[in-house]
Image: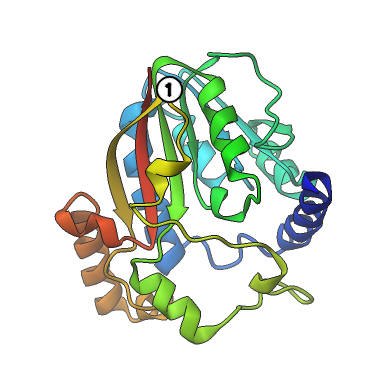
């Protein structure tokens, strides 16, 4: 069952790789990338780092600037090749069966990936396995307690390519109350960061003055009590 789901996901992301970076260098997507890098950089500085589902390497390339060593893995050859074109060390493989040794990394992180993994328990266990004791994991979940969730429900699946929509891939939503139940005993939940807390719809960032105001507000909200309502909820975990 897992193999079939992963083959489907691989085809989806191979197709998506052709257009994945279109429009990502500005506006809404630029803001999301910036927030995720700001969450990651303090943990990555001087560390051996692994990104699960690194895609075309947009985040990994920036993390690599501060890390001692930065490695990525992705299911899609199309995505991974674009990351390699950036000079990044990227492997092909499943987040449910990582080709790395136990306790190999100081930091393991993942953005916009776990929400699309059917066997999420296996993925979280593997992320914990390859992280050293005392190391950290930053795992991002899609949060149903969010404006993003409401916007997705209203708008329905969006087109991501000529022949694909978001409905072609599994998407799960896990609340701040559900996430602790997904964690193995050797992971301690330290905190949450909220990404996209206040943005009602991505299109709001097409208006320059609105985009500037929202970006400033999102930076403050990420660590505020409002963080629990982030559309992307980053769990900060420590391995015992």
Vertical position of residue 233 compared to residue 157: above or below: above
Q: Nearer the viewer, residue 122 or 42?
A: 122
Residue carrying label 1: 186
Look at 70% across and 30% down and name the residue there.
97
Residue 52, how many percent across, how many down?
A: 58, 37
Residue drawn at x 20%, y 58% is 221
Please indicate whether residue 187 sits to the left or right of residue 72 in the image.
Answer: left
Looking at the image, which residue is at 64% across and 39% down? 86
Image position, residue 141 (x, y; %): 45, 52
In this view, 238 is above or below 141: above
Rendering coords of residue 82 (x, y %): 70, 46
Frontmost residue, 207 versus 164: 164
Rendered view: 135 above or below 27:
above
Left or right: where 157 falls relative to 97: left
Element on which disc 1 rests: loop
> How many labels, in total?
1
User: In the displayed image of the protein, which residue is found farthest to the bottom?
Assistant: 154
Q: Is residue 68 above or below residue 179?
A: above
x, y (%) of residue 79?
71, 48
* Residue lying at 40% horizontally and 60% vertically, measured from the top left: 143
């Amino acid at each position: 069952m897992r193999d079939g789901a992963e083959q489907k996901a691989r085809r989806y992301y191979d197709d998506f790789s052709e257009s994945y970076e279109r429009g990502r260098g500005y506006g809404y997507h630029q803001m999301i990338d910036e927030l995720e890098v700001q969450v990651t950089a303090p943990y990555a500085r001087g560390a051996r780092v692994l990104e699960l589902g690194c895609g075309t390497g947009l985040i990994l390339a920036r993390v690599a600037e501060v890390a001692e060593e930065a490695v990525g893995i992705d299911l899609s050859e199309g995505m991974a090749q674009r990351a390699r074109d950036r000079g990044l060390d990227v492997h092909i493989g499943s987040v449910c069966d990582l080709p790395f040794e136990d306790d190999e990394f100081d930091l393991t992180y993942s953005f916009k990936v776990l929400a699309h993994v059917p066997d999420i328990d296996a993925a979280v266990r593997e992320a914990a396995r390859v992280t050293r004791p005392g190391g950290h994991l930053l795992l991002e979940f899609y949060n149903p307690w969010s404006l993003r969730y409401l916007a997705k429900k209203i708008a329905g699946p969006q087109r991501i390519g000529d022949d694909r929509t978001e409905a072609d891939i599994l998407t799960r939503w896990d609340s701040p109350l559900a996430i602790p139940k997904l964690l193995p005993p050797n992971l301690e939940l330290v905190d949450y960061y909220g990404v996209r807390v206040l943005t009602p719809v991505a299109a709001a960032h097409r208006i320059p003055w609105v985009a500037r105001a929202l970006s400033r507000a999102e930076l403050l909200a990420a660590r505020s009590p409002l963080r629990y309502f982030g559309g992307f909820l980053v769990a900060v975990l420590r391995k015992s």
